[in-house]
Structures are given as structure tokens and as C-alpha cells.
Image (spheres, helix red, strand yellow):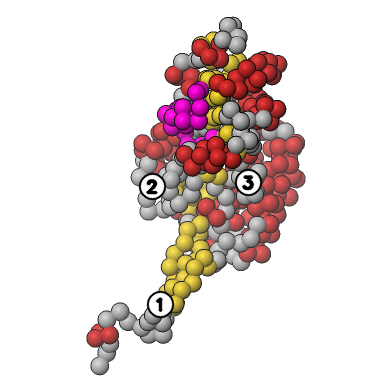
Amino acid sequence: MSGYVRNLAQAARAAQAAIAAADASTRHALLEGMADRLLAGQDAILEANAGDLERARQGGAGKATLDRLALNPERVRGMAEALREVAAQADPLGEVSRSDVRPNGIRIERQRIPLGLVAMIYEARPNVTAEAAALCLKAGNAVLLRGGSEAAASNAAIAACLHAALRDAGLPEAAVSLVADTAREHVLELLQLTDLIDLAIPRGGESLIRFVAEHARVPVIKHYKGVCHLYVDRAADVDLALGLLVDGKASRPGVCNALETLLVHRDVADAFLPRALAALKARGVEVRGDAGVRAFDAALAPATEDDYAAEFLDLVIAAKLVAGLPEALAHIARFGSDHTEVIATADPAAADAFVRAVRSSAVMVNASSRFNDGGQLGLGAEIGISTTRLHAYGPMGVEALTIERFVVRGEGQVRHPESRAG
């Protein structure tokens, strides 16, 4: 190992103490300052991003990658707004979630504190540089950022704005440390730093997640792929279900909360499927179906098991007719990725059964899969969507970047009275 990442991590770890010691108003002002600096540095950020996009196109990047990579003035404003939303949230540090007095008089409290140093390993999404930094700093953490090579210039330009805000606030720049050298060997080095890194969060394609999970010695929370389903129940409002389908699949197909599979109850197929297939075709979506779906359009490609397991991240969707809720649930249990599942139904009993049965990090009843997003769920931004059942599950905001510890307050109580000095 070169020691390059260890040196960055040591500096970030030392800087974390200053962030944790800063009061809530200081951290609030820091995030506001970061938002201001992003807007002031917009031209430099967009220029760097244009270079990244051109290199990605020349390298043969697909549409989904280019969409995640691309920045424009609206997306830069969105980053700044996300930082302001995080800044405005209640400060989590020091919050006491439980306070009990035991029979012997000691008071037991559970108190929220920072995780420490968080390592973020991500691909293509330069907005993650700003949003991950803001969430970590709000929670009193430092962050070590390792973005992908395809966004290297964009990430550096954004990090420069964040560092300027840290300097403005009199706080150490190392609290937001960017691994500028994107060589794979540095990821391996990072994943071994058990004495410095408290949590690693990979966010990107399936190959990246698997690489991190297989090589990490530090704790990992996985932002795994989104094989998201819409089940159209026999009691569904057809117009409502069409809206969920179009928004979930066609609004932005290259994101993890986009729909990838459509399951339709046979009893509603005649009313729903012709309209659904027409709506998808009008938006350029390729449908791959089972025999039941293809009976409505013989030109459709047959769906394979690989299609039902796929995160297409493109204008492609797999579709299947099912006999009812049990078959839909069995399909989701087999092919789902614990990300987001949706039911369209006017039957409260079916909705409740769906909610109880699926294991996903977010369950939508008559609402689009696209709402499984930290900003949409009131978190301001997210550092990722955890599909790992640890201390956080689903979109991870500020609170998910803290932990709770016990604080015991007493007046000299001892567990073994005979141990008192005579």
C-alpha cells in the first residue's frame, strides 16, 4: 500500500474533532456558506463537468451514466438547495432519546453522537460530493470522498468550493477530504483502514458494491441496485396506476428508484395493459413481457429471468401477468433488491397485506417509486439508500450518520456495595 489514502484519512480523522466540537449554529452557517460557494463557483463547476462529459462520451459511456454525470445550472442550484435544507434541519447531536431512572437511583440516557469518519465511494454522480459532505458535517462527522474517474474534474471543482467554505468558517479543510487519485488500489487501501474509518458507504453500479463488500474490513452499508416493482392490483384505479407507471419508468430511467418490472393482476389486464403499453411506447420504453403480456402485443420481446432480475437503468421494463397478490409477492421476493416496491390498489386490505409482506426499504401505496429519495422524504438530501439491515435502512439522512450511546449519571452508586472503601 502506498500510504496515500492513510495520510488523507489521518488528516480527516484529526479534523473530525473540530467538526464535532463546533456548535449547531457554526455547523449551520458552514452549510449555508457551502451553498453560497457552490453558486458562486457554478461556472467553474460546469466547465469541469463539460470536460468530464466529453471524456465519458469518447469512452463510450451509456445514457444512464451520462445522465447521472451531467450538471447544469438547475442541478447546481439543486445541490445548493439541498445543502440549505440539510442546514435547516434540527441538530441531532446531543439529542437524548431515552431517559430512565433505575431503582438504585442512576439515570440512564441514550444520547446521539457522530459516527466519526465516513468514507463515501461512488460513481458518476458529482452531486454526491456536496450532499455527502453536507450530511456528514451536519452530523459532526468528517468525510473521505472517493468519486469515480469519470467525474474527477467535477468532483474536484465542487470540493474546492466546499474547502473555501471551511476556510471561511475557520474549520479544517481536511474535514472534507477528496481522494483525487482514482486508482483502484487506493480503494483497497481505504477499505483496510479499520483504525481510522468508522463506516464505508458505496454508491454506484452492482460491480462497485460487490467489490467493496468483498474487500472491506471496515463496516459497510450497501446502496445496492434498485430492482423496483409496480404491482397493479385487481382493485386498482387504472388512471392512477398509469400515472405511477409513467412517472416511475419514464421520468428518469437511469436512477435507482425507477421502476424495472411491472406486475399486473389478470383481472385488470384488459382495462389496464392496452393503455399502459401505448403510454410506454409513446415515451420510447421497450417492454419485455411474459406470454400473458405479449398476448396484448405480439411484437413485444419475450421477458427472460435475467430481465426480471435486471436493473435496466434505461427505457426498458419487464412485465408479467399474475393471478393475484400472492403470486406478485412471490415474484418480488425472488427478484427484488429490497429497494422500493409499489402497489396500486383501492383495496385497503390488499394494501396492508402488501406492506406487511414486502421487505423493501420503502413501500409505496398508490404513490410513485420516485419518492424513495431523501429530499422527497423530508431528509433534505441523502448519502445513499441503504438496502442493508443495520442501523439504517432506506434513505440515509443526517440522523442515520449518527449513533446512540449510553450515558449513566449517578451519585456514587456502585454495583457491588462490598467493594466500597472501608
The residue under the point 64% across, 60% down is: 90
Residue 258 lies in what quarter of the image?
A: top right
Residue highlighted by disc 1: 102
In the drawing, what numbered circle is on residue 218? Answer: 2
Q: Using the numbered discs, state the Cα–Cα distance from disc 2 to disc 1 in whole angstroms.
A: 36 Å
- Please give the range of residues in magenta: 322-341
Q: Amino acid at mark 3?
A: Leu
Q: Is residue 264 left or right of residue 36?
A: left
Viewer-nearest residue: 307 or 54 = 307
Which tag is nearer the camera, tag 3 or tag 2? 3
Q: Is residue 153 left or right of residue 407?
A: right
**Residue 96 colored in magenta in the image:** no
Q: Is residue 351 above or below residue 403?
A: above
Q: Is residue 370 left or right of residue 199?
A: right
| Mark 2 crowd level (few <14, some 14–19, many ≥20, 10 Å Cα) | some
Dot 3 and dot 2 residues touching (CB under 8 Å): no
Residue 10 spot, x, y in % from top left? 45, 53
The residue under the point 75% across, 36% down is: 73
The residue under the point 47% across, 71% down is: 109
Q: Amino acid at mark 1?
A: Arg
Residue highlighted by disc 3: 377
Q: Which comes sooner in the sequence, label 2 or label 1? A: 1
Q: Using the numbered discs, state the Cα–Cα distance from disc 1 to disc 3 in whole angstroms.
A: 37 Å
Viewer-nearest residue: 361 or 221 = 361
Q: Amino acid at mark 2?
A: Val
Viewer-nearest residue: 125 or 163 = 125
Q: Which comes sooner in the sequence, label 3 or label 2? A: 2
The kind of secondary structure element at disc 2 is: loop
Which tag is nearer the camera, tag 2 or tag 1? 1
Q: Using the numbered discs, state the Cα–Cα distance from disc 3 to disc 2 in whole angstroms.
A: 29 Å
| Mark 3 crowd level (few <14, some 14–19, many ≥20, 10 Å Cα) | few
